Amino acid sequence: MKEQADLILEQQQHDAIERLGYGFELRRRDFFKLLGGGVVVCMCAGPLLGQESGARRRNDEDLPQYISAWLHIGSDGNVTVYTGKVEIGQNIRTSLTQQVAEELRVPMGAITLIMGDTALTPYDMGTFGSRTTPTMGPQLRNVSAAARENLIDLAAQRWKADRSLLVAADGKISEKNASRSISYGELTKGQELVTLIGDDPVLESPSEWKVAGTPAAKVDGRAFVTGKHKYTSDLTRPGMLYGKVLRPTGFRATLKSLDTSAAEKLPGVTVVRDGNFVGVTAPDSGTANKAVKLIRAEWTAPQQTSEKTLFDDVRKPTKSEGDNPGGPPRMSTGSMDQGFASADKTLSRTYTISYIAHVPLEPRAAVAEWQDGKLTVWTGTQRPFAVRDELVQAFRLSNDKVRVMVPDTGAAYGGKHTGDAAVEAARLAKGAGKPVKLIWTREEEFTWAYFRPSGAIDVKAGVRHDGTVVAWQFDNYNSGPAGLHPPYSFPNQHIEFHPTDPPLRQGSYRGLAAPANHFAREVHMDELAQLLNMDPLEFRMKNITDARAKAVLQAAAQKFGWGKEKSSATRGFGIAVGAEKGSYVATAVEVEVKDRQVLVKRVAEAFECGAIVNPNGLQNQIAGAVIMGLGGALFEAIHFDNGKILNPHLVEYRVPRFSDMPKIEVEMLDRKDVAPAGAGETPIMALAPAISNAIFAATGIRLRGLPMVPNGLPSEDNLSSA
Amino acid sequence: MSLILSVNGAEHPVDVPPDSKLLYVLREDLGLTGTKYGCGEGMCGACTVLLDGKPARSCQAPVSTLVGKKITTIEALEQNGKLHPVQEAFLKAEAFQCAYCTSGMIMAAVGLLAASPNPSDEQILSGMEINVCRCGTHPRILEAVRQAAAARVAR
């Protein structure tokens, strides 16, 4: 139920899902020509397969439209797998390749993944929400297992042998008595075989895995240490120009007057104007920058709010609430009245979350090319198909006239869902009549990208003397509904998300609002433990029934050595737990407080996401989430006033650096009996509350706002409600 | 105006305004895209190259000041198909995630180890401090630098 609700939420948050017609018939005719024969296996979602073969089947297509994954084995033995997911540093190119190798029984080196190409890969909603591992992983294993069985069939036919006496291993089919063997390439030579399968596979259990489950090295790792990998920003096209957009003076501004005559006098410069959009193209980026600086423009913008009133503004209800058919997410169990009536103590507190930026090191970038009315765009995005739709709408084209390709990208963290750079580059390329590359500057990235939402969260809880939480009221204003559900078994709860009309452009982030909701929840739990004079670990354990949540808490506590030492005025220990998207995290932290400066010295984090597909990549993701989380916890914040960002540079926006590094100990719990869940997000969630709790343990100061110590520990008279 | 730049052991005449920053000349005029743009303000290290063997931010360096200097980019480290020991160490430690920072990290480490072949942890931290890895791969990067130093000392 909860999983289903979360998925619906996820879909609402990332625009309504759209199932687009996949031009498969065309492809079937063409793809053997393209791929040179062989064996192709396609997977269709179960219900859709049923639908297609039933009354709604369309006569003009002999294959279903909705294919979620497919795989080709060529006569050279090379395996090509097509998925709409994209690689943004989370290392799924490697983990998916491992899973294909596992089921198909080929070396990883024989496999190539084509990812995020709207002309070649099946429709995909996007790479977010930690969905690749739980959904695309099984789909590709499924397709690979079917391909393997096909190959066994082909060998059995060829040899007129009993298929039960044949085995697949190392890219070959062999007889069990080893008298004959044949490579996949030889078997598929001259074949043009298409197999369709549903999504009800017979898959190897993780406990049988030989390739998946092992610490595989990153696919193409060498291309990254040599600088040879081509990110979007590194691509060139024949005749390509460089683009630059004239940015308005603030958000929501409209163009009042424009004089581009000086810019147009520069050699090779074209100015493109369309509505409020103004940009230039030039033979090199330096000339493009000069041209934009020569443009004289006047803008008018409405008066807008500032961060000074932010935490009041986020409480104003959205004016468009009625548009959301399900209403904002809300959940109630038990009776709040009875819950609070039975409590020995109650505590109400408010927690606040600032806007922060994703700061992917590769800024938004796109290369756009028009040819014969068709548009091709290379861009770093998490949602190639949604970007294609943006382009289709912007230029009033049909789907088949637009192709979006996503080179493995210089990170995203939830920040690259939209196609802004793609649309801009395409508009410039259309105006200039030549391919155009556009790379956003860091300042543009900080200003015109969207932010992790800010928010205010009110928590009111009732506890009994024995440590049982009997009432839990949790109201989140604007920050978002992800991670609202506690991993605890509270008998009486009311949890609600209240959307607002935000002052800044806001969107997804690593874990969406779950880090914010975990912060409020886990600091509040610590405050309740303090109220009862209980150990924070013992207090949490008392309210958890979920065995997986208990297991990570115990593992983190053990790794950390929780309870072995007591906090002092200069050293504090804190702990927090979380669960989201089928994975569990617990984080214990040691902070050092000296001269009102807070230093995170040590982090022990236990994480469990079911069966581990790639422990090497997982360790990197967990430690990476901890380090990224340090920034949002301690010092990252976007400052703004009247539609302007006040700190749009790295010199003013502090991100974690080498000198901020704590000692990080990661404990990965491998549950071979549980289907793998994603791991890109949940490992960030328990860090900030654990730090806050550790600071309190050392200093007695409760920090209830993120970031906690942008200017060091606040002095006593600056603390309003400690 | 034409200038001669010495890049990766070869002389390259480039016809660009003298205040052009090296990063853009490398990437757009010489096609050396291994050096990355990250911030344009010298605060992320993605554009790190070596100038006469010392790490420098190419986004801050006007080409007019570089005539006669030896410029080394990530593309020059691999020799005859053999990785530089620092590249080898980064690959072995898998000291990257999205890897967009990796070229700059490796160049900073090469420069650091040239100046201090057996650096202390403090020297490593200060030598790498300007370089940002937003994916949070810092522990592995530090480990790779230590391993590369150990491999050099062992030889």
Image (cartoon, helix red, strand yellow):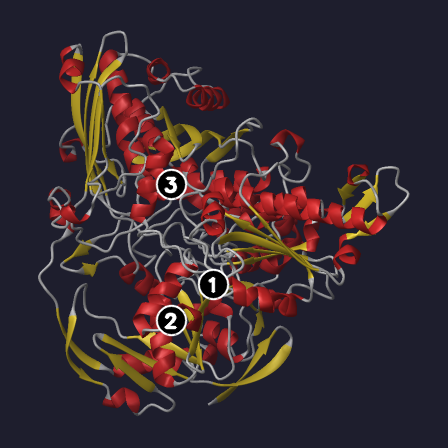
SS type, badge 1: loop
Which residue bears the numbered disc 1? A118
Image: A348 above or below A24: above
Which numbered marker is on residue B56?
A: none
Q: Amino acid at mark 2?
A: Ser
Residue at mark 2 to residue at mark 3: CA–CA distance? 41 Å
Q: Is residue A668 shown above or below A263?
A: above
In terms of depth relative to the viewer, which is nearer, A55 or A380?
A55
Name which residue type carries label 1.
Thr
Q: Is residue A596 visible?
A: no
Q: CA distance from mark 2 to mark 1?
A: 13 Å
The spot of residue A174 in percent (x, y) is 82, 44
> Residue A186 at x, y = what percent?
79, 57
The chain carrying label 2 is A
Specify the quadrant that holds the C terminus of chain A.
top left
- Graded by Cα atoms within 10 Å as few (under 14), some (14 to 19) or many (20 or more), the crowding at tag 2 reads few
Q: Looking at the picture, does residue B70 appear above or below residue A13?
A: below
Q: Nearer the viewer, mark 2 or mark 1?
A: 2
- Quickly name the residue at label 3: A629
The amino acid at mark 3 is: Gly
Give the secondary structure at mark 3: helix
Could you say which quadrant of the image residue A440 lies in?
bottom left
